[in-house]
Amino acid sequence: MNISNLTQDKTYTTVLTTLASVTLLIPLCNLIFPEDSALHFSAYSVSLIGKYLTFALLGLSLDMVWGYAGILVLGQGAFFALGGYAMGMYLMRQIGTRGVYGNAELPDFMVFLNWTELPWYWLGFENFGFAMLMVLLAPGLLAFVFGWLAFRSRVTGVYLSIITQALTYALLLAFFRNEMGFGGNNGLTDFKDILGFNIQSEAVRSVLLLMTGLSLIGALLLCRWIVNSKLGRVVTAIRDQESRVRFLGYRVELFKLWVFVFAAMLAGLAGALYVPQVASSTPANSRRSTPWKSSSGWRSAVAARFTGPSSALCWSTTPKPC
């Protein structure tokens, strides 16, 4: 066996073991041990670690599209925000008459803005299954349309990066507008329940951490399988020698499009897991990802998962318990 492959296998085994331990042990320590125990993890710590793992999943999506496909995307945060808003819309629909204005059909911000009926694009989000479908389809569809136009036109390099950054900024400005029906600058807030359970309870926070960890482990295994498959080798070859791969008869734009859409859907899933753990979905979510991924290491699957800047950002911007 190749020594480099053996070292990489050991690294992935260590990462998976650490992730599994964090995913299983921390929720148990939060629920089983009393608050005065040294083994107890507070609800604050559980939510904080859960956010770390969602950022790790977002970093994994960017690692796929940039590290292995060579497509520097400055707009991965847009897909993260779309997934978050899809989950936020479901959570807003669960509030019902418990809102400030007591309107069972309209969220509070729509009542405040004198909206008389629910917009058509909010229909169906009272159903959890439909919302989770939109978590994947909304960013995936946007990535497909954008990628199809960009890759067919052979837009590459810094030009593609600038366009994706412009896409994110345009989406940010759209979400800021009250007329769009997404809560404007304040976003979607004041969530109550998820699947009928109190979203603020320690048990739900622990389950959210568990689901985030399992999603990250599953995504890591799936991405590694893709990278080591024939598809992954072709994508890596496109990154290194695109013109030569095109000369061999491969439809380069289709391979790029597939990776771009897949990474967007991963980012959307990360956003959906992030929102219930911070209890809000705002336009600021669309500005995350690329700077701390670049500082964690290009084409570094492990660094993308445990990047320090994302953790520092999460720690420094979270209110600390008294």
Image: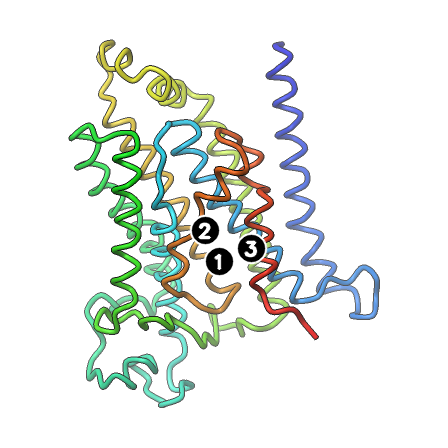
Instruction: Give residue 274's mark.
Output: 1
Residue holding disc 2: 270
Element type at marker 3?
helix
Report the quarter where the N terminus lies. Answer: top right
Give the residue type that dot 3 points to.
Leu
Residue 110, percent from left and from top: 28, 80
Give the secondary structure at mark 2.
Answer: helix
Dot 2 or dot 3: first in sequence order is 2
Residue 249 is left or right of residue 89, and the answer is left
Q: Residue at x 29, y 54 (%)?
A: 169
User: Which of the two residues, 148 or 292, is positioned nearer the viewer here?
Assistant: 292
Above or below residue 173? Residue 113 is: below
The amino acid type of the residue labelled 1 equals Tyr
Name the residue tied to disc 3.
313
Q: Earlier in the sequence, mark 1 or mark 3?
A: 1
**Which corner quadrant of the image does residue 246 belong to?**
top left
- Alpha carbon of mark 1 to alpha carbon of mark 3: how far? 14 Å
Q: Are marks 1 and 2 in contact (CB under 8 Å)?
A: yes
Disc 2 crowd rating (10 Å Cα; few below 14, some 14-19, many 20+) is: many
